[in-house]
Amino acid sequence: MQVPEGVRKTGNVLLCLVAVVGIVWGGKEIWQVLSNRHQINEACAGLVPAGRVLALSPAGGEVTHRVSDEGTIQLDDLASGEDCEIFSTEAGEKQGTSSGERWFFTGAMGAVAQGAAYTPEDPWDDLLDPLGPYSAHVYPEQPLGGGIAGTVSDTGVTVHLPCAEGRLGGRPVGTLWAWAGLTESDSPFTEQGQLTDHDRDVLADTAVITANRLADRAGCADRLPDAPDDVPALTEGPTSAAKADGTCAWYRSSGLAQRGKYGDQVLQSRSDPRAWDEGCALILSPQRANAVWEAQGDGLDSVYSPDRPGKYFASFHTYSGDAARNVRLRRSSASDAPVDAEPGKAGRDTEEPVWWASSVCAGQPRIHTMTMSSAYGRVAAPEYERIFRIYVDDQARRHGCTGITFPAASSFREDR
């Protein structure tokens, strides 16, 4: 059938209009993508991969960045740590902010100089509510895996890259670090208070690429391998001590969790030979903590009641290599000198219930620490000499350590 000339001309005009609209629309889309990439590159000095940031769930719409010195990367100060902060209109709309813009991503990086201190928990820390008085979820950090020294948290991914020969800002570099994370762990873009599978994988890529770009800038010889695919979700804690595995498997094997004065729950992670800080925490459930307090702490001014979950705990860490040479126990007050946990020695903080032991593994020092919450240590410290020995002996057995030095039995005292 022959199409009338007038209809054919009208159709051609419509097709041309559609094509023009498509070109204009596509041009706007392309312009916005280019603008968004420019915003990220400008804020992060080209060190954070813009394409990966734009692949995150909250990255839709118009992307902008913080324009102050705080929140943009300053290349002359990378050694001490810098970060860049990125906003998007989609994140703002999801959050319901009036401006339509919302901070959703932070990229941070820097160097751990040789001699930088590593510090275990304080006896006054709250292990179960890191985000506020009554956080709904607690997700212990897990190792990233894939042959990378890194950790995954409920908001982001941190990686470390040794770089003994590099320099940043005219200063030598010990180890580079990079962190990529969403700003909040409780937002429309998370699932039950942790990252989605998609965003966790993208942030792992982002952190690794950032560290490698920083390594180029610092003149480092090594690079991190690609981030692993399908980074596992975090396991919520605390879990029953009867199910302890990974870094707390030693406690389940001891059989001591069934005794009323010890922790009946654990915070743990998977074991990883590249972890520079391997930790395990024993927690007393509210019922058990209250029973201990009523039996031994009630009426003592220095022993507070366990008024919320996780207030009675014992936390263990093992630091390896360079980290083990620079472990410092927290100071009791600003005027006190810090207590160095020296390799080859063992001891206790001068006032608080914090102990350390030492060993040698594959020719490198290791420091093992134990922190008890302040009130719990004042009623249960003597019983934890045995627990600490079991923990350190398990570390030594698994890693082939020798030369173990323990604190004196008299240091496990009840300071009331």
Image (cartoon, rainbow, N blue to C red):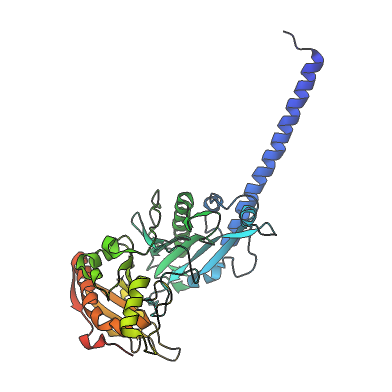
Q: Position of residue 269 (x, y in %)?
A: 33, 62
Up/down of 402 relative to 220, above or below: below
For the question of whether residue 194 can be seen, the reply is: yes
Up/down of 338 relative to 196, above or below: below
The residue nearer to you, when weighing 272 against 26, is 272
Viewport quadrant of the N terminus = top right
Question: Which residue is at the far top?
Answer: 1
Q: Position of residue 191 (x, y in %)?
A: 49, 54
The residue at 58%/52% (across/down) is 59
The residue at 73%/26% (across/down) is 15
The residue nearer to you, when weighing 313 against 355, is 313
The residue nearer to you, when weighing 271 against 50, is 271
Residue 43 location, quadrant: bottom right
Q: Is residue 228 left or right of residue 73?
A: left
Q: Position of residue 289 (x, y in %)?
A: 34, 75
Up/down of 112 relative to 88, above or below: below
Viewport quadrant of the C terminus = bottom left
Question: Which residue is at the far right?
Answer: 6
The residue at 37%/88% (across/down) is 299
The residue nearer to you, when weighing 293 against 156, is 293
